[in-house]
Image (cartoon, grey):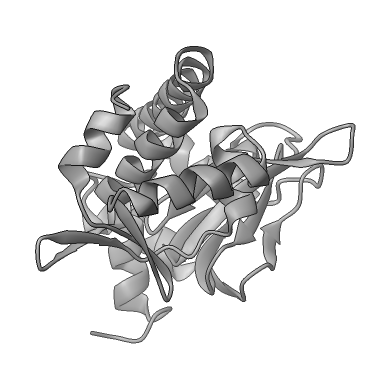
Amino acid sequence: MDAPGSPDETLELLARSALCRGMEPEKIEDLARHATRIDRSRGEAFCTEGQPADALLLIARGVVKLVRSLDSGREVIIELVGRGDVVGEAALTDGGFHDASAVSVHPSTALAIGRERARDFVAANPDAVRNVLALLHASLLRAHQRVEDLSVFGVRQRIARYLIRLADWTGRQEGGRTVVPLALSRQELAALVGTTMETTIRVMSGLRQQGLVEPARRGVVLTDRAALEMVAGGAP
């Protein structure tokens, strides 16, 4: 395979993205030629909350957290995104600003498409319009799911449910166990499920003692997914 950022892979990444999904390659070739590669190390930002959204960003490699700052000074992780996902949809609006910072959880790469070229592309392609609407709808569904989790489930259930979602997203099977290669800190996990770091540490220790999870060098292992799903549903 060509190196990341080569014309062929850029075209492939665009074709697999939420923006261009299902579109013919010839419709996105010009867009691929004008995409700029951006590399970020862990903890570095692709874009910053409150800054003008000058480019649409396609995540090509790694995992990125979307972070918003509260008036209290605390930061809240809104979502995790990865390969193929789109960040900075405000670039498609008039004078839009980023409503969250996009910060690398792992070393990550994004393709940046300038505001005007991204808007022209969407305006010229009905399929891209439908993809943008699907993207916004999916984001709304995830927000509803998060509100439901916070309203209905306790912290232990929320953590179990989130670990299962991560497994569905990035997990791989090894010897009957599910390895989730995502090195989230306890503080990051706490922010994602809406609790404190101390509570997260306590819950994760309990799940480990039950034989449901194990720490990994870079991530976590679900040693008994079926039992973890029962916890997610409310089992003791």
Between 80 and 55, the one lying in front of the other is 80
Residue 78 visible to the viewer: no
Residue at left offset 42%, top offset 50%: 85
Q: How many numbered marks have been drawn onto this rendered protein structure?
A: 0
Q: Name the quadrant of the N terminus.
A: bottom left
Residue 69 sits in quarter: top right
Relative image position of residue 110 (x, y in whole percent): 52, 65
Relative image position of residue 75 (x, y in whole percent): 76, 43
Residue at left offset 54%, top offset 57%: 64
Relative vertical location of residue 82 with respect to residue 181 in this rendering, above or below:
above
Relative image position of residue 42 (x, y in whole percent): 61, 72
Residue at left offset 48%, top offset 65%: 183
Residue 230 visible to the viewer: yes
Residue 28 sits in quarter: bottom left
Residue 26 sits in quarter: bottom left
Q: Residue furthest right?
A: 72
Between 154 and 100, the one lying in front of the other is 154
Relative image position of residue 186 (x, y in whole percent): 58, 54
**Position of residue 96 in the picture relative to residue 229 (left or right):** right
**Position of residue 95 in the picture relative to residue 106 (left or right):** right
Residue at left offset 77%, top offset 45%: 49
Q: Name the quadrant of the C terminus.
A: top left
Q: Residue furthest left?
A: 176
Between 60 and 219, the one lying in front of the other is 219
